[in-house]
Image: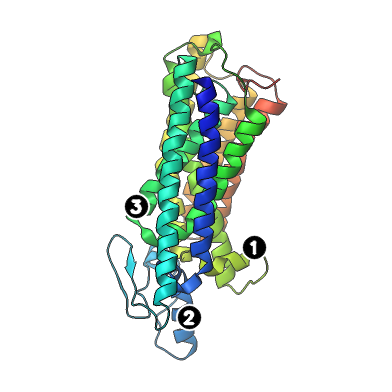
Amino acid sequence: MAALSDQLLVVAILGYLLAMICHAAEYAFGTRSLVGRAAVRPERELALVGAGAAAGPVLDGPAAEVEPTLSDGAAERPDGDATPRPAAGGGESASKAALAGGVAVGLFAIAAAVHLAVLVTRGIAAERMPWGNMYEYVLAVTFVGSVGWLWLVSRRTSIRHLGLFVALAMVLLLAVAGLVLYVPIVPLLPALNSYWFIVHVSAAALSSGLLLLGAVPAVMYLIRDGYDRGKRSFPYTLGARVPAAATLERLTFRLHAFAFPIWTFAVMAGAVWAEAAWGRYWGWDPKETWAFISWVVYAGYLHARATPSVKRPVATWIAVVGFLTMQMNLYGVNIFFEGLHAYGGLD
């Protein structure tokens, strides 16, 4: 089972890689695809305003999040999917783009299923839950991100362009896990032999996976916002074919608002477990310290996002900083620090 898990990891990485390539093919078709039309919609409206069309005041707040209707006469359903009229002479290209996008989502779903099999076979081989070291934890966190993405894209086709960057993140993280973080299966450390191992680590993995997923639209929002403001240097050129800035910002907020209470529970459960295992709730161990730093930063993001005087790009930058602190908590603490939470398994 351990060998099968290792082999399935390679298959999962290849599946995410193929999905990324297909998403890149759809991305290359630009405005002729369904997703591309949703991405360039705000540019068309700006062009109309520049031509002298009637326009309302520029809003900054909840009212600014209302997405505009398609300027080419297409209708948008309440679930966010757009149904554009086919462009003249672009039917064949639109069909190819739709096919590439559909294949990409299908490949991503297959890769996620194989990803699950990696965790299941690893758990069977270890005879425990498969998150006893940093390698297994990264597998669990990325799986949560994959499932979350599939759920999102099934409800809102217009954000499918982001699949290129989500798949890229999965390929990179799983490759690092397999090449750098991999350790053979070993018995669970005595301090981890508790039912809190399931409660605390599962909550941490779930929230971390959602925060990983939320970092993708956060970064793409900053890129799209810069592109809308006239920046044309790299990486802002990527903003030409991603969903509208308001859509990305709203998605970022919703993912973080959902994940933050779970992360809060994970930190609290860890404190209770620490009291049972080590006789104290909090000892400012490096892992505890960085978990608290991440909690404070994400709380700051949610507070900034709810404050009308704070601009959305500023608030989103706080979310990006929060993601960086999570990476420090995951990689930096386990690799560079020593403490009671040093369960990375690396020599």
Tell me how far mark 2 sits from mark 1, CA to CA.
22 Å
**What amino acid does circle 3 point to?**
Ser
Seen in the picture, residue 297 relative to 91 is either above or below; the reply is: above
Q: Residue at x 39, y 62 (%)?
A: 158
Q: Residue at x 44, y 64 (%)?
A: 246
- Decide: few, some or many residues near mark 2? Use Cα within 10 Å; few <14, some 14-19, many ≥20: few
Seen in the picture, residue 7 relative to 68 is either above or below; the reply is: above
Pick the quarter of the image with the C terminus: top right
Q: Are the residues flagged by discs 3 and 2 in contact, CB closer than 8 Å?
A: no
Secondary structure under the numbered disc 2 in the rendered image: helix
Q: Earlier in the sequence, mark 2 or mark 1?
A: 2
Q: Quadrant of residue 198?
A: top left
Q: Earlier in the sequence, mark 3 or mark 1?
A: 3
The residue singled out by tag 3 in the image is 154
Tell me how far mark 3 sits from mark 2, CA to CA.
29 Å
Query: Which percent across, then down, holds residue 254?
Result: 40, 50
**What amino acid does circle 2 point to?**
Leu
- Decide: few, some or many residues near mark 3? Use Cα within 10 Å; few <14, some 14-19, many ≥20: few
The residue singled out by tag 1 in the image is 235
Furthest residue toward left: 78
**What amino acid does circle 1 point to?**
Pro
User: Which is closer to the viewer, label 3 or label 1?
Assistant: 3
